[in-house]
Amino acid sequence: MKVSIIVPVYNEEKTICKVLSRLQKLGKQDFSYEIIVVDDGSTDTSVLEIKKSKLQIPKLKVVSHRKNKGKGMAVRTGIKHATGDYVVIQDADLEYDPQDIPRLVKVLGVAGVDVVYGTRLDRLPNLRRDERVPLFLLHFFGNRFLSLVTSILYGQWITDMETCYKLFPRKALTNIRLEAKGFEFEPEITAKLLKKGFHIYEIPIKTNPRGYDDGKKLDTIRDGVRALWTLIKYRIYD
């Protein structure tokens, strides 16, 4: 089995090399994998950092957008270049730990499991930095709400619809037309997988949340409204 790890990048000069290094250090697993980096029109030195990483990881696939098109478009570009049996998304910051990817893949051995999500929301948020408590709580309860809406609309209990770690078979996208350009990719892919009858199996993961000072790009209110509309739209339409 082969897994395509797609890494969308937009202005992540401080972390992209570390993330790629950690992915490379996954080493030999019970599955083979490829790493596909999609630079989404970065305006900082991310491209140079990616080139440095490619010297250390010769098999690294690198695709570039001339202009910033959004996370959804970057992931869609990565999927077009993927050759694996399964696809998983890895953010280019250090919020998610690549060591969790083998744990996601291992669950595929369970009977009937084809789609695995890494959930951060099966527990209370880890509020370690007092000055960011309001931010963390806003994201936590916003995601909780969207996950509840997903569960109600699509008939399967989901605790973390917005998680980055989504592992799904590439063949699941047959006859699925992805349209998302930005962060609404998360609800779109979830809605369309559920509508095709895939059961989403969740396992707990640990994350290191970051704030806007650290480079976070998600706008909780704006992108939350888009996510809600996306969930409703694809419940009604294909």
Image (tube, rainbow, N blue to C red):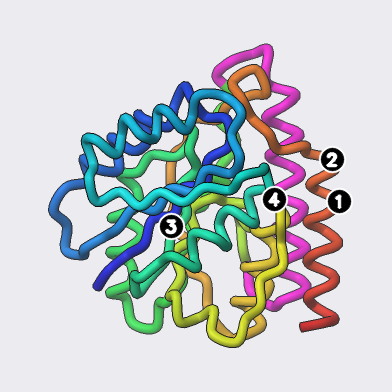
Callout in the foreground (3, 2): 2
Q: Which sits in the foreground, 189 or 43?
A: 43
Callout in the foreground (2, 4): 4
Labelled pair 1, 2 in contact (Cβ < 8 Å): yes
- For mark 1, does the 10 Å Cα neighbourhood hold few (<14), some (14 to 19), or many (20 or more) residues? some
Residue highlighted by disc 4: 183
Q: Quadrant of the C terminus?
A: bottom right
- For mark 4, does the 10 Å Cα neighbourhood hold few (<14), some (14 to 19), or many (20 or more) residues? many
Q: Which sits in the foreground, 164 or 151?
A: 164
Residue 181: % across, % down: 71, 56
- Looking at the picture, which amino acid does disc 2 mark? Ile
Principal SS element in the magenta part? helix
For label 2, the SS is helix
Quarter where residue 87 is shown: bottom left
Q: Which mark is residue 225?
A: 1
Callout in the foreground (1, 4): 4
Quarter where residue 203 is shown: bottom left
Residue 25: % across, % down: 21, 40
* Distance from Cα at disc 1 to Cα at disc 4: 11 Å
- Looking at the picture, which amino acid does disc 4 mark? Phe
Please give the name of the residue rendered at 64% of the width and 30% of the height, measured from the top-left corner: 216
Please give the name of the residue rendered at 60% of the width and 87% of the height, measured from the top-left corner: 175
Residue 102: % across, % down: 28, 55
Q: Earlier in the sequence, mark 3 or mark 2?
A: 3
Q: Which mark is residue 203?
A: 3
* Distance from Cα at disc 3 to Cα at disc 4: 22 Å
Residue 152: % across, % down: 76, 71
In magenta, the rendered stretch is 128-157
* Distance from Cα at disc 3 to Cα at disc 2: 27 Å
For label 3, the SS is strand
